[in-house]
Image (tube, rainbow, N blue to C red):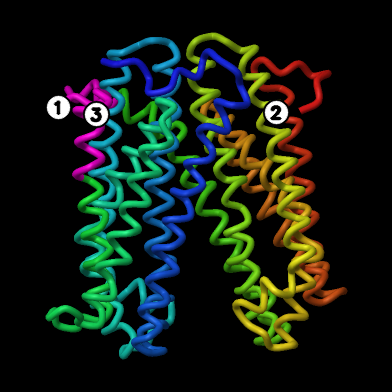
Amino acid sequence: MKKPARDLTHGPVTPLLLGMAIPMIWGILSMIAISLGDVYFIGQLGSKELAAISFIFPVTMIFGRLSRGMGTGAGSVISRSLGAGDQQSVERLCRDSLILSIIVMVVLAAIGLATIDLTFSLMGASPEILILIHQYIEVWYFGAVFLAIPMSGNAIFRAAGNTRTPSQIMVFTSIINLAIAPILIFGLLGFPPLGLMGAAIATVTAHGISVIFTLYILIYRESLLTISIPTPSEFLQSTRSILHVGLPAAISAMIIPLSAAVLVGIIANYGSDAVAAFGIVTRIEALAMVPLMALAGSIAPYVGQNFGAGKYHRIGQGLKSISILTVGCGLILAAILYLFATPIISIFNDEIAVLSVATDFLTIVPISFIGAGLVMVTSASCNALGKPRAAIILAIARFMVFLVPLALLMGHYFGYVGIFWATFLSNCFAAIIAVIILRNLPGVKPRRQV
């Protein structure tokens, strides 16, 4: 087996971290582009089709976050094995993580197919909308396994310090999806118009093609994956190791959309303009957080490899460097959003009432993105070290302990502005906990400022 694509146990720390983070930005943006593109194309079909995809989105998000959680678990154990130079374990874990992701996705997709009417009826879909939902979700469930394999493969690449390849695969997937989708949805180039079914086929096809590239690179170019059948004891051992981190990581990830749904319900009390404004700023926030997400993503393989190699002092150096980068990036983002709030919001909606609410959000909340970034860095580091409990505690504290109660309380007394201040405070309070956890990780002396 080859050495890791990038040995993170040697060399200058900051250039290593930036070298991994920058390609990840493009990969994350490409995945956002797929979502935005689908919404745009489907929106041309009509409001009913758009309503159908709105019902579908939370379900597909759950699948995505479960896959990402298992990828986090796989990346954690693989990066530590790479750092320790345990080639046999790396090959076993790479193989078994892909098998596990396939099994989990097939089982969940089968359950999903059997409960389509029940699931979406409980969510409030009307019979008319349910017909449209079937057109999309049936195809998506059959191709769900194509989503799991690239996610697990990308986690393996990142564990080896290679963020360029998964980013290239994600960008390629996005281009294929955006190219095929309008052809199949609207019936261009001689194809019949398939509507929502066409959108699902485009997504499944794009991810199916990415599976081929992912497996080819893992097997032949990186030599990280061997084709063999695991023994039951080997697979059980790998599964336990992966799920030890992966399951809590998936649960932590799912807390975020759950809390967001609760927050939308609270804001709905202040009228449709407030909801529309919140929908806009959450999309702006998602885009603004991409560089911070990339920085957090770069620290995980770095921490894992150096922990496996026993180089704890480099872990401390990396955490200090990534924290400084996170604070600096957060300050720049906050300044941009504060200074250009109105023109940025106007791209999405220029109604006075919506502009007013959205501008209040971008005046109050963005500086606390620094805190959110530090929380992501801490969670990624703890997961990489095989300490998922700290990461899930952070997620629960940030959203369930701080955000929701504060939003209810401050919204009652100060209206929607109070909810924005609750978001600001929850990020700050969670960041304090994150810094305390960071200061107690291997290689970080308590007296050092992170």
- Which residues, given as a range, are shown in magenta? 212-236
**In the picture, which quadrant includes the C terminus?**
top right
Query: Which of disc 3 and disc 1 is earlier in sequence?
Result: 3
Residue type (three-letter) at the residue carrying disc 1: Ile
Residue type (three-letter) at the residue carrying disc 3: Arg
Q: Residue at x 32, y 30 (%)?
A: 239
Number of labels in the image equals 3
Instruction: Please check the rendered image and state whether residue 430 is part of the magenta-colored stretch, yes or no.
Output: no
Secondary structure under tag 3 reads helix
- The residues bearing labels 1 and 3 have C-alpha atoms spaced at a distance of 8 Å
- Residue at the spot of label 1: 227
**In the picture, which quadrant includes the N terminus?**
top left
- Vertical placement of 100 versus 104: above or below? above
Secondary structure under tag 1 reads loop
The picture places residue 382, in percent across and down from the top left corner, at 58, 30
- The residues bearing labels 1 and 2 have C-alpha atoms spaced at a distance of 39 Å
Residue type (three-letter) at the residue carrying disc 2: Leu
- Residue 110 visible within the image: no
